[in-house]
Amino acid sequence: MPTPATMKDSVIRVLTIEDNPADVALMELMLAETQEVRFVSESVSRVSAGLERIAQDKFDVVLLDLSLPDATGLDGVERIRAAAPSVPVVVLTGLDDEKLSLAAMHSGAQDYLVKGAVDSRLLVRSIRYAIERTRTERELGEQRLRLAVLLESIPDRIYFKDRHGRFLQVNPALAKFFGLAHPQQAIGKDDSAFFLEEHAGQAMADERMIMQTGEPMAGMVEKETFPDGRVGWSLTTKMPLRDERGAIVGTFGLSRDITSLKAAEDALRVSEDRYMRLLDSVTDYVYSVELRDGQAVSTSHGPGCLAVTGYSPEDFRNDPWLWHRIIHPEERDGVIRNVTQTTGKGAPLEIEHRIIRRDGAVRWVRNKHVPHYDANGGLLSYDGLVSDITERRLARDELIATNARLTRVLADLTKSHEDLKAAQAQLMQAEKLHSIGQLAAGVAHEVKNPLQVILVGLQYLNDSPVANGENTKSVLDEMNEAVKRANLVVRDLLDFASPRELGMQERSINGLIEQSLRFVSYEFHQSRIKVVSDLAKEIPGCIVDSTKIEQVFINLFTNAAHAMPDGGTLTVKTSQHIVVADETTHAKGDRSGIRLWPGEQAVVIEIQDTGTGIPEEHLQKIFDPFFTTKNTGKGTGLGLSVTRRIIDLHGGQISVKNQPGGGVLVKLVLKAATLPSR
């Protein structure tokens, strides 16, 4: 609690909620008498007014009467605590009632003072204690919250147990480890409910030892055995749990699952054992070289040289150049350079190279030099350690080769997987389009006859006297327009579901484009659309169904016109093209395989508008039947589906993409006929 010295120059803001002016004046007088702290007091006569002031300004404490016009009893305490839980409340009332006093404290009041029994000293002390207790409670609450967050979030398992080993509290990580839906389900149980006796009994023994000695057990590696046969490992720290007097009342601990680390450790140990056994099977030997004036004057090889090289120490002693000769010819110069660098204080003191044994076998050795120098830094001699590392080198080379093979296999599997996914998507799309086509044909045939009947009826009504009325004629016109739109949908449905038989003949693509442009010229004129034709003069013809291809062009020109309602430019370009490998893709939903082969001649048609473009999220769906971004009455959602189907039937390709500067570019690729056509 702050000392008087620290409180002397501070200011405490007090809000008094009291409807008796005399009591208010008395409280302010008592607060003004103290010399320890300066009070700034404000009063209101109702709880509602007090709540308004608390919401508007900051107060350190509230003095509250229990008998007010808008609140009696503990209602005022509860309302203030609910609205401002951080502001301490001191009850100041004329009721000297012990039960009411306890009830007020339980409701959140910090103190209960009786009018007439309070002097200035008691009032000031009560206010200061209330402020300090509230601050302390807030800090304790924040600490409890931080502890709760820690227990909720930490991945390590934390528990608290009583003297009998029963769980008092566990964190969510331990509850999850036990397979429990909520930590509360572990309360009152001991380890035997979750582990076999092998682990549960040892855990109980450890906890009894901790409670007897008061000493923690830190960093223990525990083996955990479960009823379902599983075995796990944990790194655990256990400590005595003490009450507020310091008496040991149980244990608590923290454990971390190290099963995977233990498995890795065991695997490493096995690997090290295997490596040590391999080393034990390799014979090492030492040799020494003495120098004088930088030149070797004598060498000696240890007895192990016989197992490694097939030559005895006597052989090396009798033939000073024998060691040089058994070095593999491809690596002899490197070994000599290494020795030269050793004699000249060079850094490389170790080298791996091959030798040729007496029996002709090629072995790998590691040759490590340890130089010895005189007081002036001159090299006196060097010792060498030769180790046969053939098995290790072969194992390393095999590992490298195996990794390379695995990499190739993985690449092949990845490619096969991607191809399989692409094929699956194609089959699914093919079945989808096939089913939609059948449905579309059925719907179109069923709808066409009723529409024809309606159209005949409308024609009859148009010719009858009843059509002379202004309202009637408007209704009939709207009905005629609706029937025409329905007929358009039926026609598109029939086109979409039409059989694959085509009337194929060699035609000029340029001629079909010019014919199609004439069909839509009126609409372009009405929409103020300028047409720019860039048609190559010398391009091959294509084997096509001219009616179907004209339908494709008209669909695409019409779509472009709808995308430029305020006018714009339509550019149509043709060119000759040789198909490359990257363009030999499978068409989505097609069962006929590759459409265009590398090296084939093709004719490319590019149709570009300056319209609004297509939202990126819709680009993948524009060829789906009945999908459209146009307003009602502007399209059926089948135009691009029919277009795609016609291009598929011709073995061609179609792509649609937005242009960086605005508008859409549609690209068609069709197989060229053998001879060019003008």
Image: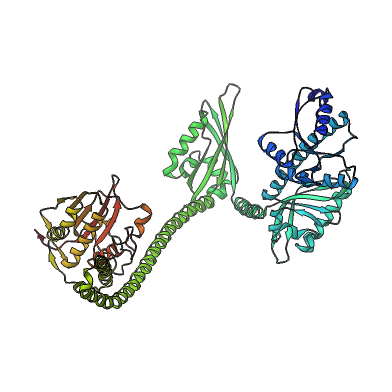
* Image height of 665 relative to 381, above or below: below
Q: Is residue 207 left or right of residue 591?
A: right
The residue closer to the viewer here, 219 or 122, is 122
Q: Quadrant of the C terminus?
A: bottom left
Asked whether the viewer can see residue 357, the reply is no
Residue 144, image x and y in percent? 74, 44
Asked whether the viewer can see residue 459, the reply is yes
* Image height of 142 relative to 121, above or below: below
The residue closer to the viewer here, 674 or 219, is 674
Residue 285, image x and y in percent? 59, 44
Residue 518, image x and y in percent? 13, 58
Residue 396, image x and y in percent? 51, 51
In the image as oriented, which residue stretches furthest toward the left? Answer: 678
Which residue is at a point 69% across and 47% down the rendered structure image? 149
Q: Quadrant of the N terminus?
A: top right
The residue closer to the viewer here, 295 or 603, is 603
* Image height of 502 relative to 418, above or below: below
Which residue is at a point 29% across and 62% down the rendered structure image? 633
In terms of image quadrants, where is residue 39?
Answer: top right
Which colour scheme appears in the figure? Answer: rainbow
